[in-house]
Amino acid sequence: MIDLQNADGPRVLARLRALLDRRGIAYDVSEHEPVYTSEQAARVRGTPMESGAKALVCKAGDDFHLFVMPASMKLHTRAVRKTLGIQRLRFATREELLDLTGLTPGCVPPFGSLFGLPTRCDERLAEQPRINFNAGDHGVSIGMTFTDYAAVERPVL
């Protein structure tokens, strides 16, 4: 089922698959009922919530970044501000997210490189042998090893 709110979703999925294919990365794509929470995603995928790679676009100071963490966690804004040495940190608005990615919240894959965004990843996601994430659509997921994800995306941990 295509999510009509994410007109760029199929294009993002195609770009992501092309990137992974070029790098010879093994991954699984699954179509499922649309999911809008981390809990729903874990249930429909049949995977632990900790293996979900939650991708959040935030404005850190003057720049946008993609923050990736286990779906069971919440972004600790104070720690992020301290680590980055910035005063202000906020989530991108729905409009900013659309402008930056062409996607709505919950559909952004953990690959900031697809959108020209620096990617920062919580090191606890590396504890998961496989990660799962929405790939441009609320009803499309990709599963792959964390090792392969880190090799392709090269996020700052």
Image (tube, helix red, strand yellow):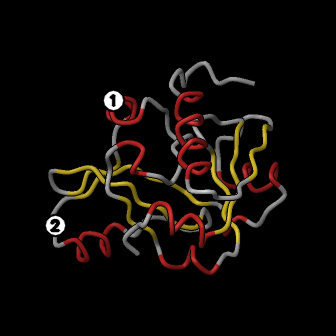
Label 1, on which residue? 99
Q: Nearer the viewer, residue 155 or 102?
A: 155
Image location (x, y in percent) of residue 140: 70, 39
Residue type highlighted by circle 2? Ile
Which residue is label 2 attached to? 86
Residue drawn where x is 59% and y is 28% of the image: 10
Residue drawn at point x = 39 percent, y = 70 percent: 76
Q: Provide the secondary structure element on which disc 1 rests.
A: helix
Residue 113 in picture, x, y percent from top left: 39, 50
Going from N to C along the chain, the mark reached first, 2 or 1, is 2
Q: Secondary structure at mark 2?
A: loop
| Marks 2,1: beta carbons within 8 A | no
The residue type indicated by label 1 comes to Asp
Q: Nearer the viewer, mark 2 or mark 1?
A: 1
In the rendered image, residue 3, in percent from the top left (x then y), is placed at 64, 24
In the figure, 22 relative to 103: above or below? below
Q: Quadrant of residue 70?
A: bottom right
> Which of the image's four quarters has the N terminus?
top right
Give the CA separation, mark 2 to mark 1: 23 Å
Label 1, residues with CA under 10 Å away: few <14, some 14-19, many ≥20: few
Taking depth in this image into account, of 147 and 124 the one nearest to the observer is: 147
- Measured from the top left, where is residue 103 in percent x and y? 48, 32
Residue 139 sits in which quadrant?
A: top right
At 32% from the left and 57% from the top, the residue drawn is: 118
Q: Does 31 appear above or below 37? A: above
Mark 2 is surrounded, within 10 Å at the Cα level, by few (under 14), some (14 to 19) or many (20 or more) other residues, namely few
Q: Which residue does the image show at 75% across and 56% down from the upper left?
A: 42
Query: Is residue 94 found left or right of 108 in the rendered image?
Result: left
Quarter of image, res 18: top right
Q: Is residue 70 left or right of residue 103?
A: right
User: Where's the C terminus, which quadrant?
Assistant: bottom left
